[in-house]
Amino acid sequence: MSLKAILAILLCKALRLVSRLLHRGGTAMPGRFALKLCPNLLALLAKDVKSVAITGTNGKTTSARMVEEAFAGQGLNYFANRSGANLISGITTEFVMNCTLTGKMRKDYAVIECDEAAARMVFGQLKPQVILVTNLFRDQLDRYGEVTHTLENILEAVKGAPEALLCLNADCSLTASLADRLPNRVVYFGIDGSAVPARLKPEISDATHCIRCKTEYEYDYITYGHLGGFRCPKCGYRRHKADYAVTDIVQQRPDGSSVVMDIKGKKELADVNLPAMYNIYNAAGAVAAVSEMGLGVQAAIAALGRFKCGFGRMEPFDLGQGGATMMLVKNPAGCNQVIEFLQNIPGRFNLVVCLNDRSADGTDVSWIWDADFEGLAALSSRLENVVVSGDRAGDMRVRIKYAGIPDGRIAMERDYEKLVDWMARQEKPIYIMPTYTAMLELRQEVIKRCGGQDFWE
Amino acid sequence: MELRICHMYPDVLNLYGDRGDILCMSQRLKWRGLGVEVTRLPIGQTARLASYDLVFIGGGQDFEQQVLLEDLHRGKDREIRAAVEDGMPFLAICGGYQMLGNYYETYDGQRCDFIGAIDIYTVGSKKRMIGNYKFQCSPEAGGSLVVGFENHSGKTRLGSSVRPLGKVLSGYGNNGEDGTEGAHYKNVFGTYSHGPLLPKNPAFCDHLLLTALTRKYGAAELEPLDDTAELFAHDEMAAKL
């Protein structure tokens, strides 16, 4: 280690200590300053650590928690950027917190979730053993731009780590297209047509036309969004067979799913500890990443039934008589999956939607009109109460009104303390759909009431 | 009374929630007991534009633009020009708005011919104009105050036969320089406003619907609706800007 690197490490550790004393997270800021002093600090620290990097639009955090559980189950000496600090600054902070004052890493393995726009700066330094790309959807257009732009970002990022094995979503025509533009070894995960009911036309698609030749795709089946058995009738680009394939969804419950996976020709039954189709994808991706790290399929599958995600991702709270579940939403594809989940739970429930438009949420809230809130209005008779909240509660109220729920049935409560008071009085289960920054704030308030972990823990 | 709305290219011009505009027009007609029929016109399909009462074109991503232009230049461009001259009401947003114009010139000087239905042109710039914005519509365009969200790098200039849709009060508008926003020519309303445009701007939506109904039936009136929710969202954003 150079003197500069050691100074950067000391600075980073000191800043983190101060932040924690001040009861701040201090997840990103210390790393930011350390990188200013020593720009290749992450590379210096990461060279002795075997890591899985996880990027893509949706499911990064959940997939990372699944991989982490498998590492823990195998007794590996690992660390992870648990708090969602997934830019180069936060990742560097996490590495520094796991090294000695002279820059020797105390851990052998790392599970690193990485923002898709920041991956360009991270992968070249991190040099992960395995890179898992979950999917690509339109997300925060004001920040990321068009989805093909995000694809190019990830492509450039992976070029910095040509030795890494890529785990790609076979069902996402955008993600899978990375394979023929990169020298990396590739394995695919996905959901086979045998597992889902036949649906041939995407409801809302972020990728209608062939990424190679711009001809409209045809589909053998669709799971959700633009994911499924795509093929281009003109140039022949099509879904690659999945090496880690979900071949049957045996059961979908409010708290999880049971699926059959075909892993390189061998059938395995897996229980996934979180509900909804998108978490089945996360599970398949995690199994691929863990297996390719050499931990064995069984270790990966066992982890799926054990892991807890928390942090607003289908996170249960003991609030009100029926309990509350926080379900982070951030773009149309993910939001539609949450709505589909609500369509499949039995009984009456309360719905709370919190819409913010801060930079981490995306300042453009128009995406709520691309999400299928009409699917919620169709549940009208099962909706006990509908509450909108957040900085853009007014927009959410209009969205729900035009979806077909009369304005008189929509309440607005922006004060989170009062909102949590109200939730605590409810008899029926409460389902909360917050955007990212709304989730952070509301979650704090909920935790004050009924316990839970601070966001950096 | 009934409006037949043609939604052009819903398969590719579907970015930024612009389908909310279709939903808004439909609901505001239905809530008044009026009929509405929305026809989707995706790439590759043809329809007689003149048989509709209003045409909507949303914004999209650059990726599909080439496919779209090929489809337009197979005859839809002529049909659109004829419909515009005939007084057909159009609502065109962002990319759809630019496309009605003469051409788009990229930042590095490459020119892409558009359909020339209205006398405007757009030149790409390096800076993206992004954010919530507001503008005051001209009296001929209903005069209402509109709040929306713009996200474009093209700078649009209007020819002499085309009036601006309104005057920018906050944000960039057509080009961030001359204070104009959008274009109004005959019954064509072109704007950069996503948001989507109509749900938070019920007065503008009703002006558009009334324009279409009046053209179809000679005279029309719209009974007022309870716009408490819409105006709450509208006023709150207008006050922030």
Image: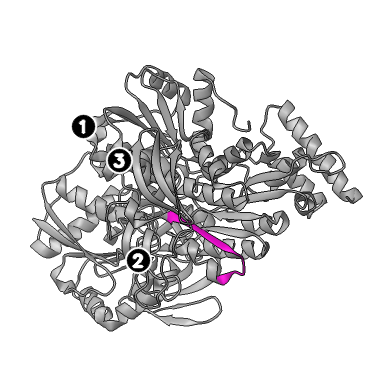
Q: Residue at x 79, y 37 (%)?
A: A13
Residue A327 on image: x %, y %: 43, 36
Residue A404 inside the magenta-drawn segment: no
CA–CA distance in space, label 1 to label 2: 34 Å
Residue A187 belongs to magenta span: yes
Look at 36% across and 62% down and name the residue there: A229
Whether pointer 1 and pointer 3 mark residues with C-beta atoms closer than 8 Å, the reply is no
Note whether A115 is above or below A430 in the view shown.
below
Which residue is more in the foreground, A207 or B15? A207
Please say which color scheme the image uses: one colour
Q: Is residue B101 visible?
A: no
Looking at the rendered image, the disc whose residue lies closer to the viewer, 3 or 2, is 2
The residue at the point 48 percent across, 47 percent down is: A282
Q: Position of residue A423 (x, y in %)?
A: 39, 22
Identify the residue under disc 3: A400
Tell me which amino acid carries mark 1.
Ser
Question: What's drawn in magenta, residue-wise?
Answer: A181-190
Residue labelled with disc 2: B12
Chain letter behind tag 1: A
Q: Is residue A213 visible?
A: yes
Image quarter hosting the C terminus of chain A: top right
In which chain is the residue bearing label 2? Answer: B
Question: Are dots 1 and 2 on a single chain?
Answer: no
Q: CA distance from mark 3 to mark 2?
A: 25 Å
Task: Identify which residue is drawn at 48% across, 69% down.
Answer: B154
Is label 1 on the same chain as label 3? yes
In the displayed structure, does residue A148 sit left or right of residue A457? left
Amino acid under label 3? Ile
Q: In the figure, is residue B16 to the left or right of A76?
A: left
- List the residue tagged with mark 1: A381
Q: Are marks 3 and 2 on the same chain?
A: no
Name the residue type under label 2: Val
